[in-house]
Image: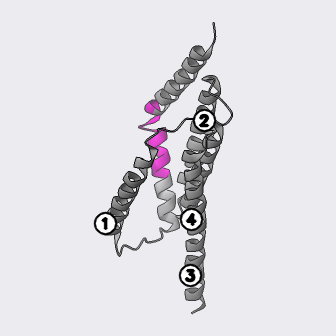
Amino acid sequence: MNALLLAADVNVAQNIGFYIIAAIMLYAAFSVVSTKNVVHAALWLVVVLGGVAAQYILAAAEFVAVSQVMVYIGAVMVLFLFGIMLTRASIGADTDVNNKDWKLGIPVGLVFFGVLVYTVVDAFEGTVIVEPSAAQIASSTTLISDGYLGDYLIPLIALSFVLLAAAVGAIVLARKD
């Protein structure tokens, strides 16, 4: 009986954690698109991506959470910030950066959001996610790492060279001479 109550408490705590993280992510996502400072927008995007990593931890996908932090927050956001700095974008608040018809995007966004909610609820209604065992987690992590360091090692290295070439190209384009 105590184990059943403990499991229920854990589920309640996970749900509360999910909603808190989701609320922070929503606020940060709205801040990304509403701020007038491009550097602040990039930093709010870091908060959103960090929230995604936190959600992965709640879903017992620690490997994916660490990958999220290393790849998106560690690498992609650094490239975004370098791109912002190298293109000599204005660092302060910009004026007149919005399209004059931006209000048309609100109902379109709401319709897309409604379609997304309907699709997800229709597809997964009544579905219960079973918590994986430790053996399943260890084997899936091993499979992912073997895939990256085995069959996909050459494409991974090629992608790193493409990103390096993009960074060097941005530096060359940003030079004045």
Q: Secondary structure at mark 1?
A: helix
Residue at 51% x, 24% y is 161
Instruction: Give the answer, above or below, for where 34 lies relative to 16.
Output: above
Q: Is residue 66 left or right of 155 when viewed as pictured?
A: right
Please state which of the two labelled residues, at mark 2 or mark 4, is closer to the viewer.
2
Q: Which mark is residue 76?
A: none
Mark 2 lies on residue: 95
Q: In the picture provided, is 135 more to the left or to the right than 70?
A: left
Rate crowding at label 3 as few (under 14), some (14 to 19) or many (20 or more) other CA atoms within 10 Å. Answer: few
Q: Residue at x 55, y 87 (%)?
A: 4
Looking at marks 4 and 3 on the same chain, the residue that comes earlier in the sequence is marked by: 3
Instruction: Name the front one of labels 2 and 1.
Output: 2
Kindly report which numbered mark, 4 or 1, lies closer to the viewer in this rendering: 1
Residue indicated by mark 1: 123
Q: Which mark is residue 58?
A: 4
Residue 98 covered by magenta stretch: no
Q: Are marks 4 and 3 in contact (CB under 8 Å)?
A: no
Amino acid type at circle 4 is Leu
Q: Are marks 3 and 2 in contact (CB under 8 Å)?
A: no
The residues colored magenta run: 142-155
Identify the mark nearer the N-term, 3 or 1: 3
